[in-house]
Image (tube, coloured by chain):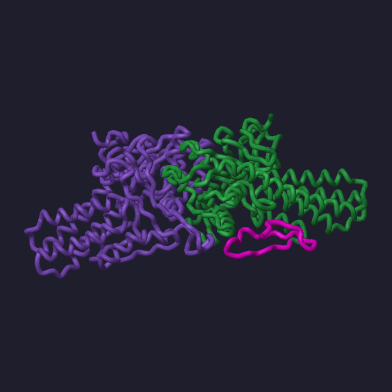
Chain colours: A purple, B green
Amino acid sequence: MFKSVEWKDGSVRILNQTKLPREIIYVDCKDVETVAHAIRSLFVRGAPAIGIAAAFGIALSGENSTATSCLLFQSEIEKVALLLSQTRPTAVNLFLAITRMKETLKAHAEEPILNLKKILLAEANAILNEDIAANCAIGKLGASFIASGDGVLTYCNTGALATGGYGTALGVIRLAHEEGKKISVFVPETRPILQGARLTMWELLQERIPATLITDNMVGLMMRLGKIQCCFVGADRIAANGDVANKIGTYTMAILAREHGIPFYVAAPTSTIDFNTASGDQIPIEERAHSEVTHVSGVAFAPDGIAVSNPAFDITPAEYIRAIITEKGIFKPGEILQ
Amino acid sequence: MFKSVEWKDGSVRILNQTKLPREIIYVDCKDVETVAHAIRSLFVRGAPAIGIAAAFGIALSGENSTATSCLLFQSEIEKVALLLSQTRPTAVNLFLAITRMKETLKAHAEEPILNLKKILLAEANAILNEDIAANCAIGKLGASFIASGDGVLTYCNTGALATGGYGTALGVIRLAHEEGKKISVFVPETRPILQGARLTMWELLQERIPATLITDNMVGLMMRLGKIQCCFVGADRIAANGDVANKIGTYTMAILAREHGIPFYVAAPTSTIDFNTASGDQIPIEERAHSEVTHVSGVAFAPDGIAVSNPAFDITPAEYIRAIITEKGIFKPGEILQ
């Protein structure tokens, strides 16, 4: 089984997802700048996986540190935390993992540097392992919403690649399949980066879960034809009022689901909930390079010199979401603060 | 000004739109098989342009005929009409143009073959010229729905490339711009063939009409952000009850427009109305090659050996359409039969 991020022989090993599924290339990051570049360039993506990568990035710079005083060590880690926090603005798991690593360091400020290095690495591994455990719990809770015979829509990639392992929304689908339910998964390709076509179809193929690739604009037709009974997506940040930031297009899928009377579920660990953000309007939306839209596989197809918009996420208001499935239970979006 | 289809020196000259905008390649079709291949392979696409290409294809086989009797000539044309009618199943303009050419031939059954050849070519040119005139009339009627300052969504390509010239939905936008209205056009790329990114952006760039390319899954967000005030799309076939078959994704755009209270207009010549089809459910939807979804510019990005769905069109029920703009006037979808 592949791992999107792991600690390997003193390096952070990251699977370069931009090359999947045609090439399987691991990058052994030996410094935190390489980790930051891997996050920024989408070698590793998916809110939980980004958080894990950042935690290992901090552990890595701890390992590499030649600081001679705890104060110097602490100041190095602060700089690294700032660098990592500027890689991607939307997924809250990134900031949560960075804050947790910094707080762990502060809680052990009296320890010698050699111990601090071990403590940081142990904390990063804990974040990884907690994420895998959360995914398994989410899968068990969420699979109850899937009946044998269902057509299931998922979106983008929320699988083992996007997390520490197993997956959130795709974990729910994986567990329903493991339970022996006969399901058929519909996978929109997820432009512009094609995570659905490249990553989700690859994971489903490996698990032999029946799946059909469609373009994003086919979802309405598939729903109208009665091929889809439920939808499961992940989240990059959940605001306190239950609004959900997720891959661009999620909002469109949610509207289509409601129009056709199909339940729309968000599956995400509680680490994705941001109690400091009151509503979706306050979540910053990353605008990415226009070449992501005008090129596929490095080949340009649109005319040169045109205006392009490339927001990487959109906000799905709470009213469109039937329930949020977390490792701690299933909530209505409006119940988060309760 | 480019022409998508024209009669040139005894050949049917077709602009190969699959190579646009990176390469401008004209194909001089010297036999009807080449015309049929050009239609099937999307060298020429867009419901009105397909009809025009088929009409010229019939005129071409008339020109090339060495038949020695009118009966033989007639039988050759019948065979050619059958071949052309099997190229694409959804756009009704194709069948209308073929029927019109056959009926023209029957109406002049007594004429010598040399005259028949001229009559067929004149009829194909008439179909072309009537389409251009219809587009100009549609543009004038439709532009009244666009106010200065509007953000206008269009979809796929309904411009000069898709028609005899000028365009239907894009003709409306073109005329609003010519009238001096300050508009901003939003162009979804239109997967899988990317007609929006490749063709509509190219036409708008040439006309210097401000336009922004987006992926299809960004439309919901753009509407929520208040960037779009009205939507104009074309049609491949309009059923008698006002249901509209158009490029896959149109149905999704129409649902999004209604959810955001944005008017959704269909602009099409009356040649696109099929009075013999009671409702959209009866319109055949073409399923195209899966490689259109799994490849862009000939490069594969999805894993091999997966299931793919590739319906080229969907049906937008009449209830989602504010009005249908034709060269003969503006109708509510339910008024077609009146």
Magenta-highlighted residues: B1-28
Where is residue B268 shown, x and y percent of the image?
65, 43
Q: Quadrant of the C terminus of chain A?
A: top left
Residue A64 or B23: which is nearer the viewer?
Answer: B23
Residue in the foreground of this view, choosing between B205 and B68: B205
Answer above or below: position of B309 versus A229: below
Residue A99 appears in view: yes
Q: Residue at x 31, y 34 (%)?
A: A332
Side of A149 where A135 appears, left or right: left
Residue B212 at x, y percent in the picture? 49, 54
Can the viewer see residue A154 in this picture?
Answer: no
Q: Is residue B13 magenta?
A: yes
In the image, what residue occupies the spot 29% across and 62% down? A36
Q: Residue at x 40, y 62 (%)?
A: A24
The image quadrant of residue B1 is bottom right
Residue at left 39%, top 50%? A157
x and y, in percent, of residue B235 in the image: 62, 43
Queried whether the magenta region covers residue A219, the answer comes back as: no
Where's residue B289, x and y in %? Answer: 59, 52
Q: Residue A330's quadrant in the figure? A: top left
